[in-house]
Amino acid sequence: MSKTVHLDEEECIGCASCVEICPEVFQMKEGDDKAEVIKPEGGPEELIQEAIDTCPVSCIRWEE
Ligand code: SF4
């Protein structure tokens, strides 16, 4: 099973929750108030799921 992490940067409001929860996979883009995925193949799945559940605009999701 290979799923990847997708983050819709258009929707992101830059709250940085995902970066706090799982910095291995998410980081804030330099010079921009948006987060980005730096490790789309994933990392600690529980933490990624927590980031997905925590994102206030629900712009992070798994893609199969
Ligand atoms: S939790 Fe959602 S809105 Fe907040 S920085 Fe991450 S992707 Fe953007």
Image (tube, rainbow, N blue to C red):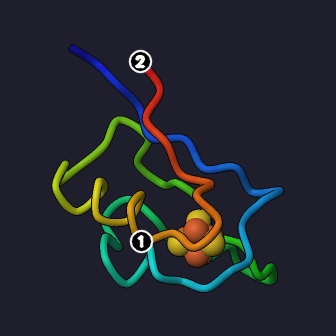
Q: Nearer the viewer, residue 41 or 46?
A: 46
Name the residue rendered at 47%, 26% in the picture: 63
Counting other residues with Cα less than 10 Å from the Cα at mark 1, is it few (<14), some (14-19), or many (20 or more)?
Answer: some
Mark 2 residue element? loop
Q: Amino acid at mark 2?
A: Glu
Quadrant of the image for the C terminus? top left
- Residue at image position (37%, 59%) is 25
* Picture residue at 74% right of the left edge, 76% below the top: 13
Check disc 1 and report its element: helix, strand or loop.
Answer: helix
Q: Give the percent coordinates (x, y) of residue 4.
A: 41, 31
Q: Is residue 8 left or right of residue 51?
A: right
Going by the image, does 34 lie left or right of 39? Answer: right
Q: Quadrant of the N terminus?
A: top left
Question: What crowding class fits label 2: few (fewer than 14 Cα within 10 Å), some (14-19), or many (20 or more)?
Answer: few
Q: Amino acid at mark 1?
A: Thr
Find residue 54 and name its label.
1
The residue carrying mark 2 is 64
Q: CA distance from mark 1 to mark 2?
A: 21 Å
Circles 1 and 2 in contact, beta carbons < 8 Å: no
Q: Is mark 1 within 8 Å of ligand 1?
A: yes
Question: How far across and how far down the image is residue 48, in percent?
Answer: 30, 56
From this view, report whether residue 11 is shown above or below residue 2.
Answer: below
Q: Residue 51 occupies which quadrant of the picture?
A: bottom left
- Quarter of the image for residue 24 reads bottom left
Residue 46, position in %: x, y?
A: 16, 55
Query: Which quarter is ligand 1 in?
Result: bottom right
Q: Is residue 60 left or right of residue 14?
A: left
Residue shown at the point (60%, 50%) measured from the top left: 7
Which is more N-terminal, label 2 or label 1?
1
